[in-house]
Image (cartoon, rainbow, N blue to C red):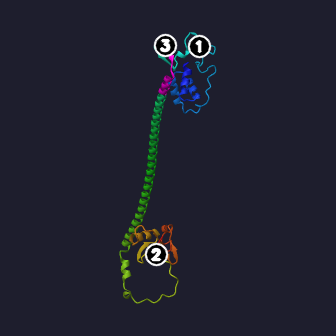
Amino acid sequence: MAEQTTLDSLLEMGFDRNRAEKAVAHTGNQGIERAMDWLMEHEGDPDIDEPYVPPVGNVLGRTGGSDPQQPSPAAQTAAEGTDPATDGSDQMIHDGDTKRPMTEEEKREQIKRLEELMRVKQEERRERERAEEVDREKQRRRQGQELLQVKQKLQEDEMKKMVDLRQREKNDDKMAKQRVRDKIARDREERALKFGGGSSSTALTSPSAEGPPSSPPSQGPPPAKKDYNECRIQVRMLDGSALTSVFKAQEPLAAVRVYVQMNGNAPEGQDFTLLSPYPRRVYTELDMEKPLQELGLVPSAVLVVAKK
C-alpha cells in the first residue's frame, strides 16, 4: 500500500520510526513530500520523539475513523482482482499501460531525489529563519534606540529645569542685593540733604579757634542717656586697609556687608563674614537681619572682615 511504502521510504532516508509514523498519520497519507514537509515543520516539537499511538479502531494502513468491520480500500481493491501494491504506490512506476515495482536502482534514485528535495526545503527554512532573526534584531535595535531617545529627552528636560531654577535663584539674589544698594543710596541722599555738609565743617574746625576751656562742671546728676539715630562703622579689610561710613541705627548689619562688597577690594565672589574684635563675636546669617542698634554697634564700632 502507498502508506506502507511512504513509511518505508522515510525509514530508508534515515528518519526515526516514531517521526515517520506520525508524519504519515498527520498528513493523511498524501505522499512522501507532504510527510517530509510535516517532519520539517514539526522538527522542534517537544513530543516529536514520543511513541506514536494510532487512534482507537485505526491501524497504519487504514483510513482514520473508518468502521473496523468495513473492509479497507486495499481489501476492496484485492477483492476486485487488483494488486494493492499497484494502486497509488510510491514504489511503483508506469511502464506503458501497466505498473511494475521499482527496481533497487530506481528506489535509490527516488530516495536521492527526495533527499535533495528535503535539503532544498531545509535550506529554504533556514533562510526564512535567518530573515526572521534579522527582522527581530532590527526590531530590538529600533526599540533600544527609541528607549535611549526617551531617556535622553528626560535627562535634557531635568537639566533644563535645574538650569532654570539656578537662574531664578541668581536673579532673586541679584534683585535682593540691588534693593539693599538702592536703600543705602537713598539713605546717603537723605543724610546729605539733612546735614548739608555742616557736620564736616564743624569737625574740621581747629581747636585753637575755640574759646578757652571751660571750667569743669560742678558735681550734679548724671546726664540722660542719649538716643542715637546713626552710628559710625569702621571696617578693617583683609589687606589691612579700612573703610568708614555712617549708617542708620535701624539699618540691618547686611547693609554694612553690602557696603563692603561694593567698596572694598575683596575679590569678586569671595564669601566673607564680619566680626567684632573685642569682645570677640562672629556675626551669623541671622545677625545680618538685625538692626545695628540691637547688635550694640551704636554710636560707633569697629568690625573686621574674615574669610568663611
**Residue appearing at x 59%, y 13% in the figure:** 75
SS of the residue under disc 3:
strand
The type of residue carrying mark 2 is Val
Q: CA distance from mark 3 to mark 1?
A: 21 Å
- Camera-side mark, 3 or 1: 3
Is tag 2's residue or tag 1's residue first in the polypeptide sequence?
1
User: Looking at the image, can residue 299 be seen?
Assistant: no
16 vs 142, left or right, is: right
The type of residue carrying mark 3 is Thr
Residue 65: horizontal and vertical position, in percent? 60, 18
- Camera-side mark, 2 or 1: 1
Is tag 3's residue or tag 1's residue first in the polypeptide sequence?
1
Residue 291: horizontal and vertical position, in percent? 48, 69
For the residues labelled 3 and 1, say whether their Cβ atoms are less than 8 Å apart: no
SS of the residue under disc 2:
strand
Is 38 one of the magenta-colored residues?
Answer: no
The relative height of residue 279 versus residue 68 in the rendered view (above or below) is below
- Camera-side mark, 3 or 2: 3
Is 100 one of the magenta-colored residues?
Answer: yes
SS of the residue under disc 1:
helix
Q: Which residue is mark 3?
A: 98
- For label 2, the crowd category at 10 Å Cα-Cα, with few meaning under 14, some 14 to 19 and many 20 or more, is some
Q: Range of the magenta residues?
A: 98-114
Q: Which residue is mark 2?
A: 304
Residue 134: horizontal and vertical position, in percent? 45, 39
Q: CA distance from mark 2 to mark 1?
A: 124 Å
**Residue appearing at x 36%, y 77% in the figure:** 198
The type of residue carrying mark 1 is Ala
Of all residues, the one furthest to the top in this rendering is 80
Screen quadrant of the N terminus: top right
Q: Which residue is mark 1?
A: 75
- Mark carried by residue 4: none
